[in-house]
Image (cartoon, rainbow, N blue to C red):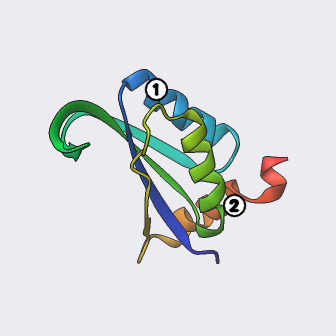
Amino acid sequence: MSEIIEIHTTIDSRDAAQKLAEAVVSKRLAACAQVSGPIMSIYWWQGKIERDQEWLCVMKTRRELYPAVEQAIREAHPYDEPEILAYPMIAGSNGYLAWVERETQEETRA
């Protein structure tokens, strides 16, 4: 079985987060994506502390698809440097992990 990862990004609106999630899932780069928020982000940017409302988009995919998912995020994202983080799944139900793998295979993307 492939290594399954979870990719997180934050974005500035609910609509943008939903469009991003739909784009990645419709291309079968991820088996699923969840949008949650709003969340309050506090961060350093260009020498000062910023506070913004954002939405979190979490995608489940195979490790080897990370470069394509990152590219899709960058193409759709309005930020100069978006948060794009990937986390390995250290455990999960066999059925769910198999589903993620199956739904992101090349033949299902065709």
Which quadrant holds residue 92?
Answer: bottom left
Provide residue 35's location: percent of width, then percent of height.
Answer: 39, 37
Query: For the residue labelled by badge 1, is the local secondary structure a helix, a strand or a loop?
Result: helix
Locate residue 100 relative to residue 58 in the image: left or right.
Answer: right
Residue behind mark 2: 102
Q: Which mark is residue 83?
A: none
Residue at left offset 53%, top offset 28%: 19
Image marks 2 and 1: residues in contact by CB distance under 8 Å: no
The residue that disc 1 covers is 16
Q: What's under tag 2, amino acid-wise?
A: Arg
Mark 2 to mark 1: distance in Å?
27 Å
Horizontal and vertical percent for residue 48? 16, 41
Q: Residue at x 64, y 78 (%)?
A: 1
Q: Say which of marks 2 and 1 sits in front.
A: 1
User: Secondary structure under badge 2?
Assistant: helix
Looking at the image, residue 59 sits to the left or right of residue 53; the answer is: right
Count of all numbered marks drawn on residues in the image: 2
Q: Is residue 17 left or right of residue 95?
A: left
Residue 87 seen by the camera: yes
Mark 1, Cα crowd under 10 Å, few <14 / some 14-19 / many 20+, is some
Earlier residue among tags 2 and 1: 1
Residue drawn at x 70%, y 42% is 27
Please state which of residues 63 and 68 is positioned toward the viewer in this rendering: 68
